Image: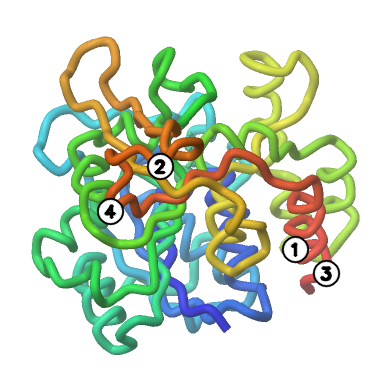
Amino acid sequence: TTKMILDCDTGVDDAMAIMYAALHPDIELLGVTTVWGNVHVPLATRNTLRVLDIVGRGDVPVAQGAAGPLLGGPAEFAYEVHGDDGQGGAGDDEPVRAAEPRSAVQQIIDTVRAHPGEVWLVPVGPLTNIAAALAVDPELPELVAGVSLMGGAALAPGNMSPVAEANVWHDAEAAAAVFRAPWRIIMAGLDVTMRALITPEHRDRLAASGEAGRYMARILQHYGDFYRDVAFGTWCCAMHDAIAVAAAVGALDVRSAPTVRVHVDTTGGPGHGQTLADLRGRYRGYPEQEGAHCTVLLEIGDGIVDEVVDLIAAAA
Ligand code: BDR
Ligand code: CA
């Protein structure tokens, strides 16, 4: 099994990643930490707790994290994408419990230190909590199994600017610190997550299933409407965050992806928040690739959306 901490800014696709991680038979979900991003962090926490209730995982510790970027400055949110409640306007009951008193940073450090070499960190929101944990405990890179993150774009266009993806753009300084640290990183960026598409057929399959699937189908509606209007012209949405979970648990072919250096632009200019993946070394063993530790996913097979949907649809 894969031990995992999921760090999320729980909007719609985050909820799907939580369900997938919480239900996956080969994942031991040791904790979920929340971060600002799609929504304010208290709402991300609320949504996280509720989604875990729905899949019967009230046992998973949830800890709240950062409310805004690492170095201060304005926080911007994405309510237009994820709805006023971050759950497509279809969020229902309140969660039955509260988050633990421990901070997200503390949960991450305690959990990683309790299982040296075994825990995958899976951040699927802005990287504020992960960078903050790194600042408090600089030994984390030697203590984790790896970091599998949803963020960035190597060759694909951005979604917050022509070149920047939202999770990196929201806190580029935090992302730069995370990409600089010497841990193994798997980058599931827009190159692959914009091609993992949830179709009306997937939504309908979820809608015809148990409570978890029906909840997911309801919250997907607004999110797919948004993607229809801004990207695809037809109802359809990007699964994004569950791809980082899938990569960590070995559900994707990660070995054929290039492992290269990735630099995050923090200049504040038009390139701010861009992930510059040096893909040259793939072909010619560039000396610049010395010490490269970031595996950049560029291709994923077709099956993963079905796998995630089927797992959720099979839940009670
Ligand atoms: C990322 O931004 C958020 O809206 C999604 O939850 C995902 O993590 C995609 O760029
Ligand atoms: Ca997210």
Rate crowding at label 1 as few (under 14), some (14 to 19) or many (20 or more) other CA atoms within 10 Å.
many
Residue that extends furthest to the bottom in the rendered view of this protein: 114
Q: Are marks 1 and 3 in contact (CB under 8 Å)?
A: yes
Q: Secondary structure at mark 2?
A: loop
Which residue is identified by label 1? 312
Residue found at the far front of this picture: 284
Query: On the picture, is 124 further left or further right than 1?
Result: left
User: Disc 4 designates what residue?
Assistant: 291
Upstream in the sequence, badge 4 or badge 1? Answer: 4
Mark seen at residue 314: 3
Residue at 64% over, 64% down: 20
Q: Amino acid at mark 4?
A: Gly
Structural crowding at the residue carrying mark 3, measured as other residues with C-alpha within 10 Å and reported as few (<14), some (14–19) or many (≥20): some
| Residue count near mark 4 (Cα–Cα under 10 Å), binned few <14, some 14–19, many ≥20 | few
Mark-to-mark CA distance, 4 and 3:
42 Å
Q: Which mark is residue 285?
A: 2
Q: Position of residue 198 (x, y in %)?
A: 76, 39
Choose top left, top right, bottom left or bottom right for residue 234.
Answer: top right
